[in-house]
Image (cartoon, helix red, strand yellow):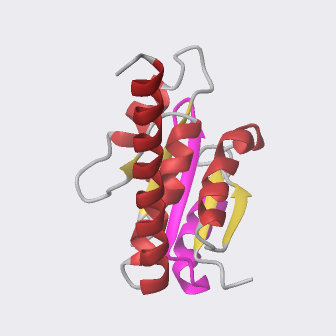
Amino acid sequence: MSKVQVSIVMGSDSDLEIMREAGKALDEFGIAYEIDVTSAHRSPERTADFARKAAGRGIRVIIAGAGGAAHLAGAIAAHTTLPVIGVPIPSTSLQGMDSLLATVQMPAGIPVATVAIGKPGAINAGILATQIIALGDAAIAKKLEVHKEKLARGVEEKSKKLRTSVGG
C-alpha cells in the first residue's frame, strides 16, 4: 500500500459508520489513509498534538467528522496549515444542523472546507481530498477525470431509460 496521505478523524467511534464513507471514496482512487478518534472537547491536548504533527508524518489532507457542537475540524485547523475538511455528523435531535453550523462558521483565518451532513458529506470529503491531492499527482487527476465521465454516462443512461419507458 502507498504512503498514507489523508487522515480521517472523528469525535467518537459512533461516527465511524458515516466516516467510513470517506475512506471508501479514497479507496476508489487508490489513496492511502488512516482513521482514528480524537475529540476537541474530551481530548483537546491529543487533538492539538495530532494536528501539529500531521504534516510531519506526510499527511496532506485531514478529514474531520463530528456531531453536536462539532468543533473538531476547527480545533484541528487552528493547529495546522494542512487543508481540513469538516463533515457534520447528524448525532442530535437537530439532525446535524448544529454540526453543520459549528463546522462551517469558522473565524477568518482558520478555514475549514465543509461538506454536506452525514454520508453524502463524507463521500464528498473523500472526493475533495482526492481533488486536492490530484493537484500534484497526474495519475490521481486522471482517475478523477474517469470518475466524472462515469457519472456523466450514468446520467445519460438513466435519461435514455426514462425517455424510453415513458414513450419519449
- The part of the image, by quadrant, that contains residue 97 is top left
Residue 151 magenta-highlighted:
no
User: Is 63 in front, or is 156?
Assistant: 156
Farthest-out residue, left = 108
Q: Position of residue 101 (x, y in %)?
A: 38, 32
- Viewer can see residue 137: no
Q: Position of residue 81 (x, y in %)?
A: 39, 72
Q: Position of residue 143 (x, y in %)?
A: 49, 72
x 41%, y 68%: residue: 145
Q: Please determine whether, in this image, residue 140 is positioned above or below residue 35.
A: below
User: Is 23 in front, or is 112?
Assistant: 23
Please identify the quadrant where the C terminus is shown: top left
User: Is 52 in front, or is 95?
Assistant: 95
Is 52 on the left-hand or right-hand side of 101? right
Q: Position of residue 46 (x, y in %)?
A: 66, 62
Is 33 on the left-hand or right-hand side of 134? right
Is 29 on the left-hand or right-hand side of 135? right
- The part of the image, by quadrant, that contains residue 5 is bottom right
x 52%, y 16%: residue: 94
The stretch of residues the image draws in magenta is 45-71
